[in-house]
Amino acid sequence: MLSIKNLHVSVGDKPILKGINLEIKPGEIHAIMGPNGSGKSTLSHILSGKSGYTVTEGSATYQGKDLLEMPPEIRAREGVFLAFQYPVEIPGVSNVYLLKAALNSIRKHHGQSEVDAMDFLTLVKGKVRLLEMDEKFLYRAVNEGFSGGEKKRNEILQMAILEPKLCILDETDSGLDIDALKIVSEGVNSLRSPDRSFVMVTHYQRLLDYIKPDFVHVLANGQIVKSGGAELALELEEKGYSWLEDAEASA
Amino acid sequence: MSASTQEINNLINQEYKQGFVTELETNTFLPGLDEEVIHKLSKIKNEPEFMLEYRLKAFRHWQTMKSPEWAFVNFDPIDYQSISYYSAPKRKEDGPKSLDEIDPQILEAYKKLGIPLDEQERLAGVAVDAVFDSVSVATTFKGKLKDAGVIFCPISEALREHPELIKEYLGSVVPITDNYFAALNAAVFTDGSFVYIPKGVRCPMELSTYFRINAANTGQFERTLIIADEGSHVSYLEGCTAPMRDENQLHAAVVELVAMKDAVIKYSTVQNWYPGDKNGLGGIYNFVTKRADCRGENSKVSWTQVETGSAITWKYPSCVLTGDNSVGEFYSVALTNNYQQADTGTKMIHIGKNTRSTIVSKGISAGKAQNTYRGLVKVLKSAENARNYTQCDSLLVGDQCGAHTFPYIEVKQPSAQVEHEATTSKISEDQLFFCQQRGLSAEDAVSMIVNGFCKEVFKELPMEFAVEAQALLGLSLEGSVG
Ligand SMILES: Nc1ncnc2c1ncn2[C@@H]1O[C@H](COP(=O)(O)OP(=O)(O)OP(=O)(O)O)[C@@H](O)[C@H]1O
Ligand SMILES: [Mg+2]
């Protein structure tokens, strides 16, 4: 699905990612943890095509194609989805309008016709129920006046409707209350399938209690300093990151 | 990579689809303006004597006036002697009786503009007056309207056929002394539309005028007068386009609306005059005076405008709320791109008791354009319990354009309530990236965000126009992101 090799990324002259290597196979869930400022969002952004970053070395291959060459909207249409750490507001544009425009642009890319209005509504309402949202959110402007948790839930709604192949969740759990975390996790779990992969950036074990990862990676200072199974997250919860950074420094 | 600010600026590269020229034999005056030209004009139009006097009075007054300099626009002084004040396609002495007599070239031009004048192809339910340079070339559905008692004809025809209405109402809302361009218009106006809706009549269809500038080096000076008598209703639409030329052309129009007791006038404009090229060469100077007098109690006038064209727009559709309980509304979208300049807004003058006004202005700037909202809300001592609500929003696309807001408020009546809200926002790179990450192209994202921004105004437009306006906005922003 995704193969990242020796990826180096800078902003201006400042190196942020310093040689990332990561293999993600279809159906796998990878959790990425690490201290603030270690480069987790930068990795999410570079994979989804945000401008302002320079790749100085390395590559990222998605479904056999050079991901870094593709314009962001093409990546999206090919199935790369980023649930943003800080979702933006778009005044005047209703959620349902955006969803329809997005879904149709993806369908068009795959040579499919525009979605039928009734089918679309049935699909959307089903997903709204799955995430236990109020249907009123559909008709409100995208994220405008939404609470922090509502914005995060809205990201997952979009993901559930667009059915991407590679789902990157950047701290989707932060800002969610305990009940919402459970609902959103169930939403994510319902999307698990043998041909869909997840990259979940998180700071907390809590999320991983609900969505069990196949791999956990620790990103520190622009590099993956440790990888392991689900048990690594528990160890981190107990010990924090300093022992890894110390280990890295002494290595 | 997603669109950067630089790319957003590069995206501005619009194509103007109405920029063609129709080759025609015309009857055109030599450039220049003096009393003799006005005599000639009045004669060629077969006008009654009182009109010639009206024009001469206006001309003499205009000569004492100075071109206004207060607007937030920049242009070289206009040489009024280099403009031709009359240009009309050649035709039979007494004008075309039916469509068969209209030059097929003109019919073709309107067809290309999407305004078929042809019987079968006409827009259902919309009567059209087609003004081509200085003359009205056709008015559709005249018969059907006549049955309802509605008069809808070129103003030059009304001058001859309904002089009593003209004498009573022409200049009663915008006097010849009102301003520089209004005085010039009163002196040299050539054609435009005239509407009279009799007492208690609900006009059976939408009325519309389509203004087309075709000839080079001419000015278009049109005059529209709409009178809605007691208890009547009318919805009127106006559209405008012009060929692409390197020279600037002047369009100085005057529109007067009179609403009597319980009458309702809805006036909608989609202004798409040629805006000039992307380096700011050419384009129409659109200097227009539009004013409504809500003369009777409970009358209502609603202006809705979508302004996407013209090199310079200078225009303030206004309402004088004379009658008690009368209502004035102004809904505006003004989009400027490249080097376009717009200084537009409204005036709401509250005179009667319990008068209410609403102003919703949406200004969008892209490229190197400047967009100014200028509005006056004036509440006179007599206007007890007057209320105004103003909302004025600006949206910037890219970082080389400007938005300016000049709200003037004068209140002489303590019971009045005046509210003003203003916002300025920018389409951010984060918004664009978010939309792209969901699969939309940058252009579709800008168009979606701009349309969302204008939603409150678009919902005031008649259905067919709303669709056209949305498409037009998309087109005008073409090339505004990379
Ligand atoms: N545009 C930028 N200009 C300068 N520095 C930047 C820019 N974007 C990111 N950085 C820096 O890169 C580093 C990594 O940032 P990033 O947002 O990827 O961290 P993160 O791991 O997601 O942190 P958090 O856990 O707080 O979300 C930080 O030091 C940040 O300040
Ligand atoms: Mg982050």
Image (cartoon, rainbow, N blue to C red):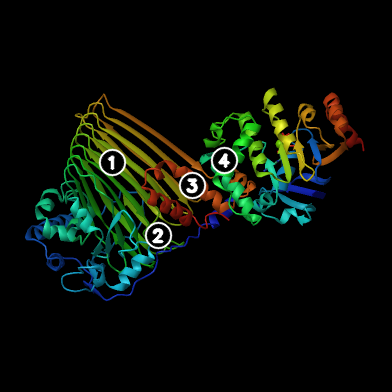
Crowd around label 1: few <14 · some 14–19 · many ≥20 (10 Å): many
Residue at which label 3 appears? B450
Count of residue discs: 4
Quadrant of ligand 1 in image: top right
> Label 1: which residue?
B347
Q: Gap between marks 2 and 4, in whole Å? A: 41 Å
Callout 1, which amino acid?
Answer: Lys
Q: For mark 3, does the 10 Å Cα neighbourhood hold few (<14), some (14 to 19), or many (20 or more) residues?
A: many
The CA distance from mark 4 to mark 3 is 25 Å
- The part of the image, by quadrant, that contains residue B390 is top left
Q: In this view, does A132 lie to the left or right of B181?
A: right
Using the image as rendered, state which of residue B227 and residue B11 is in the foreground: B227
Between tags 3 and 1, which lies in front?
Answer: 3
What amino acid type is highlighted by mark number 3?
Val
Callout 2: helix, strand or loop? loop
Residue A144, given in percent of the width and then of the height, sits at 54, 34
| Label 4 environment density (alpha carbons within 10 Å; few <14, some 14–19, many ≥20) | some
Query: Is the residue marked 3 within 8 Å of ligand 1, measured from its CB?
Result: no
In this picture, residue B223 sits left or right of residue A39: left
Is residue B179 among the parts visible in the rendering?
A: yes
Camera-nearest residue between B317 and B324? B324
Mark in front: 4 vs 3: 4
| Quadrant in which residue B430 is drawn | top right
The residues tagged by marks 2 and 1 sit, at their Cα atoms, a distance apart of: 25 Å
Could you say where residue A66 lies in the image, as x and y percent from the top left?
A: 76, 56
Discs 4 and 3 carry the same chain letter: no
Q: Which residue is drawn at 58% across and 43% down?
A: A120
Real-space CA distance between mark 3 and mark 2, rounded to the nearest whole angstrom: 19 Å
Name the disc covering residue B275, or none. 2
The type of residue carrying mark 2 is Pro
Q: Which residue, given by chain and number where applicable, does mark 4 sit on?
A: A121
